[in-house]
Image (cartoon, rainbow, N blue to C red):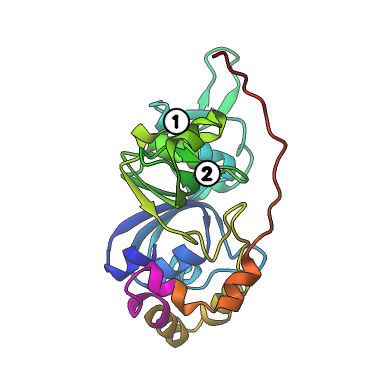
């Protein structure tokens, strides 16, 4: 997202279940024309700044869903379905502010169901723990909507903490959430999820979220933040060098391995 902001991209539609710090920064930088989301806020910290202001003052378009509805849109997009039926959402006010949420009569039971349209992003960007050079991604911990978003998308960019030999990926095929043939570009990017976390590599940098929260409702402070941490930083490596060694060490996690499984083998 920082690179997208640095390149001064404009008129983008950003779809993300959790619209948080990065999307807030993108809106502040003028990147977004529209937001599609199911939650908007800095988790555990507070409300958004620029994104909330832009929505409340009709400066950008927006579509809000429940988490399940947004996941259903991606699933429909991945499965090439015309819509996805749900019981979720009936009786809420979401359909009053989002015309994409509609109802149909079930042809089997006659009951009223809520439906949402498919979502097929032009580009999906995901971050994973590791991959081989063919782009087969290993993901563990919170998987979220990675698989659905990848299969629904036209193009996929994957950033990873490390690139490993294919024998590592083959040793645990059930952890391959995304197959390599779905990945169009693979980028080695250690600490690529910061200030969020990567399970097994580093923890969430809560201080970064509180720092943004303290600035995000002041236009001058936001401009200074974007200049210091994005526009004046040429790439991700330079961004990481701006973070202190003490900060990075405090976020590192100790090993905590799951119990091995035996896949069995016949020689």
Location of residue 265 (image quadrant): top right
Location of residue 14 (image quadrant): bottom left
Disc 2 crowd, CA 10 A, few/some/many (<14, 14-19, 20+):
some
Label 2: state its secondary structure.
helix
- The Cα atoms of the two marked residues, 1 and 2, are separated by 19 Å
The correct choice, above or below, for 222 with respect to 128 in the image is below
Disc on res. 95: 2
Q: Main secondary structure of the magenta part?
A: helix
Q: Is residue 144 left or right of residue 81?
A: right
Residue bearing mark 1: 76
Q: Position of residue 57 (x, y in %)?
A: 44, 70
Q: Position of residue 89 (x, y in %)?
A: 60, 39
Q: Position of residue 60 (x, y in %)?
A: 38, 63
Whether the magenta-drawn stretch holds residue 215 is answered as no
Task: Kindly report which numbered mark, 1 or 2, lies closer to the viewer in this rendering.
Answer: 1
Q: Which residues are magenta?
A: 228-239
Q: Is residue 102 visible?
A: no
Viewer-proximal residue among 128 and 150? 128
The correct choice, above or below, for 173 with respect to 56 in the image is above
Residue shown at 69% from the left, 34% from the top: 260
Residue shown at 35% from the left, 54% from the top: 13
Q: Residue furthest front?
A: 267
Viewer-proximal residue among 232 and 119? 232
Q: Is residue 170 visible?
A: yes
Residue shown at 52% from the left, 39% from the top: 71
The correct choice, above or below, for 170 with respect to 7 in the image is above
- For marks 1 and 2 on the same chain, the one whose residue lies earlier in the sequence: 1
Q: In which quadrant is the C terminus drawn?
A: top right
Disc on res. 60: none
Q: Position of residue 73 (x, y in %)?
A: 46, 37
Say if mark 1 contacts mark 2, CB within 8 Å.
no
């Amino acid at each position: 997202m920082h690179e997208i902001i640095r390149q001064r991209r404009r008129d983008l539609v950003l779809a993300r279940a959790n619209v948080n710090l990065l999307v807030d920064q993108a809106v502040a930088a003028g990147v977004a024309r529209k937001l599609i989301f199911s939650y908007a806020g800095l988790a555990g910290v507070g409300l958004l700044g620029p994104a909330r202001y832009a929505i409340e003052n009709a400066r950008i378009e927006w579509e809000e869903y429940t988490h399940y509805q947004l996941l259903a849109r991606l699933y429909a997009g991945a499965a090439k379905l015309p819509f996805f039926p749900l019981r979720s959402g009936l009786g809420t006010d979401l359909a009053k502010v989002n015309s994409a949420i509609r109802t149909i009569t079930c042809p089997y039971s006659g009951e009223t169901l809520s439906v949402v349209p498919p979502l097929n992003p032009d580009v999906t960007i995901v971050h994973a723990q590791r991959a081989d050079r063919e782009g087969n991604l290993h993901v563990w911990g919170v998987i979220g909507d990675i698989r659905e978003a990848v299969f629904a998308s036209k193009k996929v960019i994957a950033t990873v903490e490390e690139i490993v030999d294919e024998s590592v990926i083959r040793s645990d095929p059930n952890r391959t959430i995304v197959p390599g043939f779905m990945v169009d570009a693979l980028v080695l990017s250690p600490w690529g999820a910061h200030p969020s976390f990567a399970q097994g590599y580093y923890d969430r940098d809560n201080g970064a979220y509180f720092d943004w929260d303290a600035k995000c409702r002041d236009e001058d402070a936001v401009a200074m933040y974007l200049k210091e941490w994005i526009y004046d930083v040429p790439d991700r490596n330079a961004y990481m060098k701006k973070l202190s060694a003490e900060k990075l060490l405090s976020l590192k996690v100790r090993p905590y391995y799951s119990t091995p499984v035996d896949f069995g083998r016949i020689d």
